[in-house]
Amino acid sequence: MQPQRPHLQLTSKKLAKVAGIEDEVKDVKDFLGRNCKDSLLIFDSVDNPDIDLRNYIPSCSHGNVIITSRLAETKHVASSNCHIDLNDLEKEDAIELLLQHAHEEKSADTNKLASGLLIHLGIML
């Protein structure tokens, strides 16, 4: 089992510092829910079943969240129609999926950005 909670708390502290707010997880969650209209939160490799991501995700109708996990129970965080069970994807399929869910048109620029993001996240080599 991977110890992810300390990393989530450290990331929350860094976000708090940048935003100039208290560094409690709840304060950061509330700030993101009130102020970040076009946000993208990425929780990569969430493979610790003891972590409740709902403590970190704002309750709002704006912004996007991507969670990657090998644990089937992680999908309980998403609405029933907002999760996708995936096997390994080909490069083009991964790019297309990311752009579709980011509501971005496919172009040379967006393909390059999506490819870079997927490489950075270790999803695509």
Image (tube, rainbow, N blue to C red):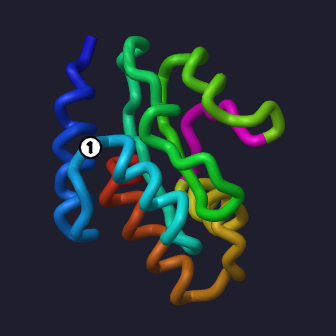
Q: Give the overall secondary structure of the magenta segment.
A: loop
Residue under the image location 63 percent in, 87 percent down: 107
Magenta highlight range? 82-90
The quadrant holding residue 5 is: top left
Q: Nearer the viewer, residue 94 or 31?
A: 31
Q: Nearer the viewer, residue 105 or 20?
A: 20
Q: Is residue 88 left or right of residue 99?
A: left
Residue 7 painted magenta: no
Report x, y in % for residue 88.
55, 36
Image: 57 above or below 15: above
Residue marked by disc 1: 24
**Kind of residue indicated by mark 1:** Glu
Image: 42 above or below 48: below
Q: Nearer the viewer, residue 100 or 31?
A: 31
Report x, y in % for residue 89.
58, 44
Report x, y in % for residue 60.
65, 54
- Helix, strand or loop at label 1? It is loop
Report x, y in % for residue 64.
59, 58
Residue under the image location 31 percent in, 59 percent down: 120
